[in-house]
Amino acid sequence: MSKLTGKVALVTGASKGIGAGIARALAAEGAAVVVNYASSRAGADAVVADIAKAGGKAVAVRGDVSKAADAKALADAAIEHFGRLDILVNNSGVYEFGALEQITEEHYHKQFNVNVLGLLLVTQAAARHMGEGGSIVNVSSLVTRIVPAASAVYTGTKGAVDAITGVLSQELGPRKIRVNAVNPGVVETEGTHSAGFIGSDFEAGAVAKTPLGRIGQPKDIASIVTFLASDDSYWLNGEILFAAGGAR
């Protein structure tokens, strides 16, 4: 039997990149998956189609995680379509780098609203439906360890995610709901391609600082999230796992 047979998962920001990889990996282990997207319906539909082709169950649901009503609707969709909710992966995130003098209110709120408020709202909505054995996985970032220049706001959001992971592990632990985080390094996705990171000096620098000699792929992160979602990690709670090939 697969690790997640009979479980239902909600993955935010799952229409592409790391989120899409996570959704496919959870489904491959037997979970029914709510594939959340904010704007790319085509991407979400493609993920659902891939899961269905492989014999799994999934549904695409639009929602802006930074809006309380949308967050509630995402959690409710899991109940409506699959009857329960066992796993939440808070993957939705945006990034925008800028030096101190470039920071604006818009720059700040754009990132904190999705990366922090969105995580809190979706977790709040999902936790109401989750019971003993539930698992929440927050996707944070290596930036909280390496604190790169010109990333004060983005790194601040992920530092908040790390701290919130610890707090919620204390709050939800007594209900036997575990909360952990995975912190990826640079991963090759549609986003890192469009941002110009892939094939650039930035990528070369990241590889040079990575003992395993390459940047990550979505599957590298998805396998760790699947572990954290499963009973294989039943004694992990409040942990932050850095997934960056040894980069420091």
Image: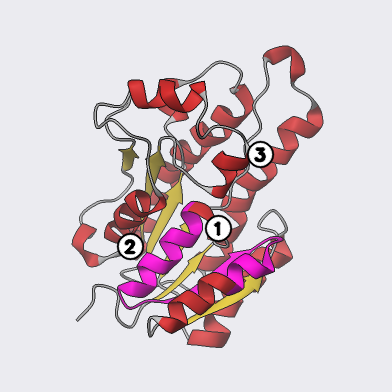
Task: Specify whether 112 is left or right of 85.
Answer: right
The residue segment tinted magenta is 18-45
Q: Earlier in the sequence, mark 1 or mark 3?
A: 1
The residue tagged with tag 3: helix, strand or loop?
A: helix
Percent across and percent down for residue 235 are 20, 55
The residue positioned 57% from the left and 41% from the top of the image is 193
Rendering quarter of residue 244: top left
* Distance from Cα at disc 2 to Cα at disc 1: 20 Å
Q: Earlier in the sequence, mark 3 or mark 2?
A: 3
Task: Specify whether 86 is left or right of 153.
Answer: left
Mark 1 or mark 3, which is nearer to you? 1
* Residue holding disc 1: 16
Q: Are marks 2 and 1 in contact (CB under 8 Å)?
A: no
Q: Amino acid at mark 3?
A: Phe
* Distance from Cα at disc 3 to Cα at disc 2: 25 Å
Residue 194's disc is none
* Residue holding disc 2: 229
* Distance from Cα at disc 1 to Cα at disc 3: 21 Å
What is the number of callouts on the image?
3
The residue positioned 74% from the left and 37% from the top of the image is 109
Instruction: Please check the rendered image and state whether residue 193 is part of the magenta-colored stretch, yes or no.
Output: no
Task: Specify whether 237 is left or right of 160.
Answer: left
